[in-house]
Image (spheres, rainbow, N blue to C red):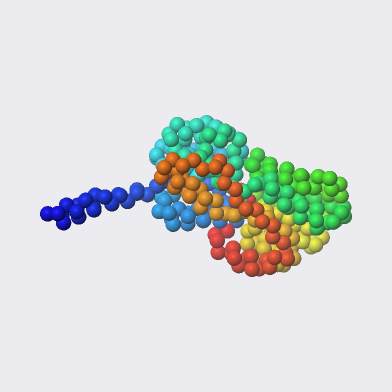
Amino acid sequence: MLKTLLATAAILAVPAMAAAQTVGFAQIGSESGWRAAETTLTRQQAEERGIDLRFSDAQQRQENQIAAIRSFIAQGVDAILLAPVVATGWDSVLEEAKDAEIPVVLLDRRVDSSEDLYLTAVGSDLEHEGEVAGQWLVDEVAGEDCRVVELQGTTGSSPAILRKSGFEKAIEGHDNIEIVRSQTGDFTRSRGKQVMESFLQAENGGAEICALYAHNDDMAVGAIQAIKEAGLNPGEDILVVSIDAVPDIFKAMAEGDANATVELTPNMAGPAFDALAAYWKDGTQPAKFIQTESKLYTAADDPMAEYEARKDLGY
Ligand code: GZL
């Protein structure tokens, strides 16, 4: 009798397996290699944690992300991940998530909404990335005159705004460096190539262009193709500096076609799920910003080894 009672007590004492948490992920799209890797790693991180991940690809359209968030709210998910395509226009839908008591975690990009509308934001210091890229160019040209063309990211996105301001901060006071043309390439290879072609055409075939600063590697890779088709040597005639550290930029570096990149980790979901686990467990409030590292890589850093280290990460 006692044995039965003890056995029964033991069974009752075992906490029921926690039901799998369900998380909705309102992803921007698949505009770049980096974005594809972020999606891949988010799925992997969710699987490792037994999280049921519901995924939405917004094709870089804010209205699609807002619709996805409303759908996740209606499904009663336990949390929402949002990589906001642009920085404005989120207050209303974030209020709806808050009213439904569903925590929202921002991944990668930022919003101009009040901090009380999201649990935390995981991302890099976007302005610092621009400063690192700008400082590399300042050091590289060492006082020589340098006319720069700039491929901006998606208009209105926090990376486009902050990577621009960061680069400008770094070159401030260095009158030998001037941004002579600047236009969005929307973070894609195809647009990066098209806009670079227009820069080359407008700049006497590129003879007076000293450097390209691209807000991401994918636009830089597209621009490299345009520079080659114009009969110039990317990485030599026109220096190439960009951001993300995707595998193909390291391949370009190894071939002498690119010079420097600033790394952006695609694993933002790991820290996000860790913060959510603590919040679900006992309501722990994380810091409002969980910063990821930004590291400079140049052609001196064994680019093919860096390529090999990244090529299977889902870029
Ligand atoms: C930056 C991120 C950018 C990447 C691009 O934080 O939002 O979006 O640099 C991606 O590759 O398209």
Can residue 180 be seen in this snapshot?
A: no
Residue at the image position 59 percent from the left and 38 percent from the top: 111
Horizontal and vertical percent position of residue 165: 73, 43
Horizontal and vertical percent position of residue 282: 41, 42
Q: Is residue 295 left or right of residue 70?
A: right
| 167 relative to 96, above or below | below
- Given residues 296 and 240, the one toward you in this image is 296
Farthest residue in the front direction?
A: 2
Horizontal and vertical percent position of residue 301: 70, 65
> How many numbered callouts?
0
- Given residues 4 and 76, the one toward you in this image is 4
- Given residues 310 and 187, the one toward you in this image is 310
Residue at the image position 56 percent from the left and 35 percent from the top: 115
Q: Is residue 31 left or right of residue 183?
A: left
Residue at the image position 76 percent from the left and 55 percent from the top: 136
Specify the quadrant of the image occupied by residue 232: bottom right
Residue at the image position 43 percent from the left and 34 percent from the top: 100
